[in-house]
Image (tube, rainbow, N blue to C red):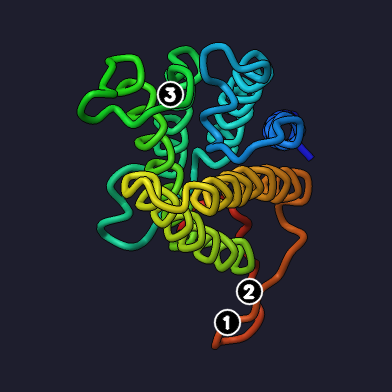
Amino acid sequence: MTPQHRRDAALSVAGALLVLASLVIIWVSRLTVPRELYVSELGAVGEPTADAFRLALLLLVAGGVLVAWAVRDLRARTPILRLGTPALSLALACAGFFVAANVPCTSGCPLPLGDTFTWQDFTHTLAAVLAFAAACWAMLQVAFAPGHRPISRLSLAMAIAVGAIAAAGGLLSLARWNAEFGSRLELVATTVGIAWLVVVGLVRAVGAVRPSSSMRLSAAGPTPRKLIGDSAD
């Protein structure tokens, strides 16, 4: 194993652990709040969980950047998804979460519509929505990139799950109906998305440590399997 492989493996593991720490903090914070609330409300101005939630988002940003570095040589085959790389999409998602961490919503996290409009809530909501969208796009790009088949399938399943669940939760929020169920959907979507980053970081670390250890079967017979970070033929 070359020094570069060792460095990439270490950075991938570090990224996965930072992201996992972020998820743990979010769940611990959520469990300390006795009422139903959307994830962003954990960081709302005046909430006792605000500082912990900001730390969780910053850990997510740091870990996400490291995972983005780990998949820097990955690119989707599908024409539309080839517009950019998973690394770029993850970097944009991290930028959105960084803004959301530093511009929290106001108390109650009201939607920035009508009488409840504030630029602070608008900035936070826009940053969070764009970050989620970029993360889902990165999942799809990994799903259709040449490489490790199991992680590609997992990425596709998680992208669909996060997109559908987050969209349902968002629609319930916009409709101001059944907010309790909508908040739970958002927490599930957040958990799935962060868990995906953890898995990708660890898989990429294994690929860096054992770059030529796996084999795959093609129609012509056994050929070397490319791990998630390998480039296309």
Can you see residue 204? yes
Cα gap from disc 2 to disc 1, whole angstroms: 7 Å
How many marks the image carries: the answer is: 3
- Element assignment for label 1: strand
The quarter of the picture where residue 43 lies is top right
| Three-letter amino acid code at the position of disc 2 | Thr
Please give the label number shown on residue 218. 1
Please give the label number shown on residue 164. none
Q: Residue at x 47, y 36 (%)?
A: 90
| Three-letter amino acid code at the position of disc 3 | Ala
Please give the label number shown on residue 95. 3
Q: Residue at x 67, y 20 (%)?
A: 49
Report crowding for label 3: few under 14, some 14 to 19, many 20 or more residues within 10 A (C-alpha).
many
Q: Is residue 154 above or below residue 222?
A: above
- Element assignment for label 2: strand
Please give the label number shown on residue 223. 2
